[in-house]
Structures are given as C-alpha cells and as structure tokens.
C-alpha cells in the first residue's frame, strides 16, 4: 500500500503530544464522547438503520436526531435548525434562497472567502463594509454602505447582510446587536456568522434579532468536519428549507418532503453523531466563556512583556482567537537566523507547542480555547523563554 | 455470547478514549498527578477486568 494513515508511528497525535494553538482547530477538538460516537457510527449510512416514513434525517428518532435538532434550535433560541456540512453550506443555502443574479449582499473587509463564494454562486455581488483603526465594524459604517448601495442600485437593495460576530482575522468581537439593528431599520435580512461564537460563547438568536444564524461544528462545537448549523426563524424556514415539488416526467416519481437547498438529507453518520455526543458538553462549556477570555487576557499580558510584541485588534481583547504582531521582536531575530522565519516554529515545536503557521514571524494567529490554566501558563512561559534565549528584553 | 463480546469490546475502546482524554489534558508533559492519576488508575483497572472477561469468552 502506498500510504497507511493508521501507521501508529506516523499517526496524527497533535492533540495528545502537543499544545495545539492552531487558530481554526482549538474549539473543534473533540470531546471523548464525540470520539466514542465516531468509533460506533463510522460505518457509511449508520444513522439510517431506522429511517422510516417520511424518510428525512431530521425525522429519525433512533438515534434521536430530530430531538437533537430541536435541542439545537432551543439552545440558539431560534425556531428551526439544520445541521449542515460546514458553515459555508449555511451561507450557500441562505444566499441561494434570497439572492438573484444582479442582487447585492453586504459583507465586510473581514468576511471569510466562503461568504464571497456563496454570494457569487447565486449570481449576486458582495459589497464590503470597512472597519475602524482597530479592525472593528462600526454600525454607522454599515448604515453608510446600505445608503450608498441604495443610491446606486435602488431602494430594494441590498437583499442580505452577512456579518461575523467574531472575525477570523483578528478575533475581534464586533457590536453585532447594533449591526443587526441597523440592518433591521433598513428592512434587510441579517445572517449572523457565528463560526467563532456558536459553541464557545452564549448566542441568543431572538435576543440578537438575527434572521439566520450560522455556526461551525468543526471550528467551534467540538465536532468533526464537515459540520455546521443553520438556524432560522419560522418566518424564513419555509423559504430556506423549502421542499421539493419535482416529479420525474417519465417515472412519475416524486420525492416527499426532501429539502431542496439541503439536497435532501445533509450531514449524517459519524460526523453528525459525534456532534450530537459533544452537544451536552458544548452547552455547558459556553457558560464558562468568561473564564476562557480571562485565560486569553492573562496570556496577552504575559506575551506583551516581550519587547516589541503585541496583539493586533481591539483592547481589551475579548476572544481566545488573537493575532500576534511580532514584527519588532521575533521577526527581527528571524532576519539573522539560519532557519529564517522557521526558527520560531521549530523553537515552539521543540517545546511541544504547535499550530502557528510555519515560517511566520511578523504576525500570526493563535487560539487558546479550551486549554487548561497550566497549559496557558506553559505557552506564555515558552514564548518568554524563547525571547530570552535570543536576547529580547522582558518587562515586568 | 457474541453480543457479550461486542459489548466488552466497546467498553474497552471507550475506556481507552477516556485515557486518551487524560493525555490531551496533560499535554505536553503527560505527568499524571492527583485526580488525573486516580482517573488513570481507575481506567486501567477497569480495562484489565474487561480484558480478563474477554479472555474467558474466546
């Protein structure tokens, strides 16, 4: 065999042997319950042992998938939820439902590329709201953008606003309630991108006033890829989760209550069951979000003792995802080091810390979510130890 | 008796997943102290019992 992914000498053991700071991986680390579900439900259509009439994933009661869907909806304080193959498929389902060719949707300069692609697939275009000097989206910027679009494209545009509560570039927490309020004042439906919030911090859809909530299972819900959630209100559910009317012209077949934008049934088998297994733990962990932020702030305080090192973005920093600027510290060392920018990666690796982008020393993202206090202290100490090794000064 | 073997096999695999969780919690040192050490000992004791039962069934 040319490759063996189960070779025990070469198997992935990042979460066991290292502290993994990868910005997109931390909150997707599985619970032991999820790993047990993977073991049990790994076989193909394992969720479909008792798929009875009306033959749809969310109607299956054993395992209790329907109950899980309702539990997710209640937890997000929304009316209807579907598990999707990633947040991106949530963007796609909403974009295809709401946008027509020529329409405008609003995102931001911090929008994930999949937001652009979802809008593009619908034949529409995405207008970007800008950010302030701390890379934060201000409500007035959104209002100005909507006004600008209306002046050029007419008062029935834009047709959708898609903004992140927490962006993936800086981990900034944007004033989402005010942004949704602005969108509502203009009568534009709002898609709340919770890829870095749903599953790590409390999210209350009705309180926010969001029309759609999208979350990422593999980024923030201790679930395997590809998983995500799309939640909406009963007002929008029939449009987003519309069912098929198609009939075969020769066979005369029809397809019951299969949902067209979801291509029938969505995520099934091991990824879905693992997500279900993690859900009780996820519901509990969001209640401890403040503690996670305290750990992140502790790390920042220690990290910024290294001369020339700082975090980028808003202060105080309110998320475990953060972008570190080391242009005036580790990057200066990299210039003279024989390994160049790779020196930092190797120094961290030697101390069993991984997850930063290999070769990056100017700025790079890390995420501390879910680490114990001991592990956070260790990470802070290691950065300082490497700094001292290369004669950078530490302040008190 | 095959059902019993299957049940024991899953219990053994799940116990190993619980052990794996301890490795993750204590990375990178993998030093088991206090509560973690007690959990690890309990897991291994249960695993030993299951392996003994499995041995009797084959």
Image (cartoon, rainbow, N blue to C red):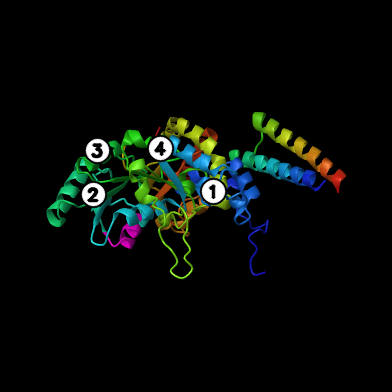
- The answer to whether the residues at label 3 and label 2 have Cβ atoms under 8 Å apart is no
- The answer to whether the residues at label 4 and label 2 have Cβ atoms under 8 Å apart is no
The span from disc 4 to disc 2 (Cα, nearest Å) is: 26 Å
Which is more N-terminal, label 1 or label 3?
Answer: 3
Q: Which residues are magenta?
A: A115-124
x%, y% of residue A387?
45, 44
Q: What residue did someone put label 1 on?
A: A272
x%, y% of residue A344?
47, 52
Q: Nearer the viewer, mark 2 or mark 1?
A: 1
Q: What residue did someone put label 3 on?
A: A181
Q: Nearer the viewer, mark 3 or mark 2?
A: 3
The span from disc 4 to disc 3 (Cα, nearest Å) is: 32 Å
Q: Nearer the viewer, mark 4 or mark 3?
A: 3
Q: Chain under label 1? A: A
Question: Helix or strand or loop: what does disc 4 sit on?
Answer: helix
At label 1, counting other C-alpha atoms closer than 10 Å, the crowd grade (few under 14, some 14-19, many 20 or more) is many
Question: Helix or strand or loop: what does disc 3 sit on?
Answer: helix
The disc at residue A130 is 2
The disc at residue A300 is 4
Report the side of A147 relative to A230 (left or right): left
Task: Specify whether disc 3 shares its chain with disc 1.
Answer: yes
In the image, residue A120 sits, relative to residue A203, either above or below, namely below
Going 76% across and 39% down the picture, which residue do you hit? B47
Task: Specify whether disc 4 shares its chain with disc 3.
Answer: yes
Which is more N-terminal, label 4 or label 1?
Answer: 1
């Amino acid at each position: 065999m040319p490759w063996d992914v189960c070779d025990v000498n070469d198997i992935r053991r990042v979460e066991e042997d290292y502290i993994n700071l990868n910005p997109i991986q931390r909150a997707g680390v599985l619970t032991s319950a999820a790993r047990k579900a993977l073991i049990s439900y790994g076989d193909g259509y394992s969720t479909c042992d008792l798929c009875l009439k009306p033959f749809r994933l969310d109607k299956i009661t054993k395992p209790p998938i329907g109950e899980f869907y309702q539990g997710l909806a209640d937890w997000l304080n929304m009316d209807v939820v579907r598990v999707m193959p990633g947040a991106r498929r949530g963007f796609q389902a909403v974009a295809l439902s709401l946008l027509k060719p020529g329409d405008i949707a609003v995102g931001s300069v911090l929008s994930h590329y999949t937001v652009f692609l979802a809008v593009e697939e619908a034949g529409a275009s995405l207008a970007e709201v800008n950010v302030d000097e701390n890379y934060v989206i201000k409500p007035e910027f959104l209002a100005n953008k909507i006004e600008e679009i209306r002046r050029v494209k007419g008062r029935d545009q834009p047709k959708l606003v898609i903004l992140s509560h927490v962006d993936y570039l800086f981990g900034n927490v944007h004033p989402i309630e005010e942004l949704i309020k602005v969108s509502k004042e203009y009568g534009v439906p709002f898609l709340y991108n919770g890829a870095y919030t749903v599953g790590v911090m409390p999210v209350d859809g009705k309180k926010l006033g969001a029309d759609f909530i999208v979350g990422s299972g593999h980024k923030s819900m201790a679930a395997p890829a590809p998983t995500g959630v799309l939640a909406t209100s009963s007002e929008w559910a029939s449009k987003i989760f519309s069912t098929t009317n198609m009939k075969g012209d020769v066979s005369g077949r029809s397809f019951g209550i299969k949902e067209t934008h979801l291509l029938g049934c969505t995520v099934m088998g091991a990824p879905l069951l693992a997500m279900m297994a993690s859900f009780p733990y996820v519901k509990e962990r969001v209640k401890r979000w403040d503690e996670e932020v305290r750990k992140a702030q502790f790390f920042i305080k220690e990290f910024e003792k290294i001369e020339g090192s700082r975090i980028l973005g808003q202060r105080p920093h309110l998320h475990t995802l953060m972008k570190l600027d080391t242009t005036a510290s580790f990057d200066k060392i990299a210039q003279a080091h024989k390994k160049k920018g790779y020196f930092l990666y190797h120094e961290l690796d030697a101390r069993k810390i991984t997850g930063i982008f290999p070769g990056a020393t100017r700025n790079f993202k890390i995420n501390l979510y879910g680490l114990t206090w001991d592990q956070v202290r260790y990470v802070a100490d290691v950065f300082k130890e490497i700094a001292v090794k290369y004669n950078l000064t530490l302040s008190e | 008796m095959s059902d019993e073997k299957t049940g024991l096999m899953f219990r053994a695999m799940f116990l190993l997943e619980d052990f794996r969780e301890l490795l993750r919690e204590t990375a990178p040192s993998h030093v088991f102290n206090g509560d973690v050490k007690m959990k690890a000992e309990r897991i291994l004791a249960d695993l030993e019992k299951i392996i003994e039962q499995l041995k009797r069934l084959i």
